[in-house]
Structure formats: structure tokens, C-alpha cells
Image (cartoon, rainbow, N blue to C red):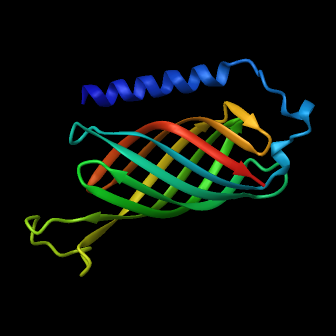
Amino acid sequence: MKYFKRIILVSLVTILYLTRLPAQNHDHEHGHDHSELRNEIGIGGGALYSPDHETWGGGFHLHYFRALGLHGKWALGGGLELARIDGNHFTLGAGAKYQPIERLEIGLIPGITFFKHDDDESSDTHGHDDSGYRSRFSVHVEAVYDLLHFGKFHLGPAVDYSWSKDDAHFMLGVHAAYCF
């Protein structure tokens, strides 16, 4: 539990620090107004930590979002997350993201997580299928700060939290996206 508190504290301090950075890249001066680009394809990766199992691993996610209108702060989309921590699993989901301030985006993607199960797990077959996977409802929350912009690309730190009945983990990593 002490690691969980440290990860939360470091994540909050990082996000607060990044939102206070002075704007050093003025996209409007270079003719790139990201608010007029409604579609985003993004990837992210980083280190995962599971407070329940006190283990580390790695993760990767891919998503697509489309803004609800020109200059919109809300977008809808979906994504895929792959995680290697205390076993492998992947998640498919659909949800929304919101931009409360310039460059900061917060996403919420509920979905279904598929866990590879071992034969010696409980005999409960609820949620199991013949492929060796069991499925559970899950929720993925992500905060991304677009620190750097390069034309239609942006790059920055990301903090994720993923929860399901069988697993919960944090990811501290990097997010990159292409807007069009």
C-alpha cells in the first residue's frame, strides 16, 4: 500500500508541475492549430505497477478519438491496452476524453479485459471461454500532457490507471499521437 501512495503522489506532482510550465511552443505562430484537427491516433507505453501484487511490468496502448465538433473539448473513441504484469492480459474498450485546459487530456475508457488463465486457478468457469481466457469488465483512466508539438504530432508524459475485478495497475509512461 505504501507504493500505491507514492505512485499517486508522484503522479499528482508531475501533472501539477507540467500544467504550470510556461508555454514554450506557440503552435499558432507556426500555423499549426491543433484545435481544428478533430481526429487523433495515439500510442503509449511505459512501466506498470500493480499495488495488489506489488509487482512491476510493462504496458502498451493504442487509441483513436474524434472530437465532438470543431474546437471541442470532448472526444469519443476507443482503444486497446496490452499489459504484461503478473500474467498477460489485453483490454478492448470505448469511451471519452476531455480537455480541461490546453494540452491536458483526461480519458475514461470502460471495456472488457481478457486474462489468460492457468489450469490451476479456481474451478469457477464464469467469464471463461474455450480459448483459455477469462473476461472481466474494466475501466481505464488516463491523463496525458502534450508537452511537445511537432506539426500534427504531439508527445508527452502519461499516467494511467486500469481497474478490473482481477487486476489493478498504474502506468507511468510516454504518449505520442498524430492528429488529422
- Residue 74 position, x and y percent, is 71, 52
Q: Is residue 162 left or right of residue 29?
A: left
Q: Which residue lies furthest to the bottom in this view?
A: 130
Residue at position x 69%, y 38% in the image: 100
> Is any part of residue 135 visible from this angle?
yes
Residue at screen point 36% across, 44% down: 58
Which of the image's four quarters has the N terminus? top left
The location of residue 143, given as percent across then percent down, is 55, 39
Residue 78 location, x and y as percent? Answer: 57, 62
Does 89 appear above or below 29? below
Residue sitting nearer the eye, 80 or 150: 150
Left or right of 115 on screen, residue 119? left
**Which residue lies at the image location 67% right of the left edge and 35% below the top edge?**
146
- Residue at 28% x, 27% y: name it: 3
User: 127 or 60, which lies in front?
Assistant: 60
Residue 175 position by quadrant: top right
Residue 102 seen in the current view: no
On the image, which quarter does residue 102 sit in?
top right
Q: Where in the figure is residue 131, as x and y percent of width and height?
A: 26, 78
Query: Is 150 situated above or below 21?
Result: below
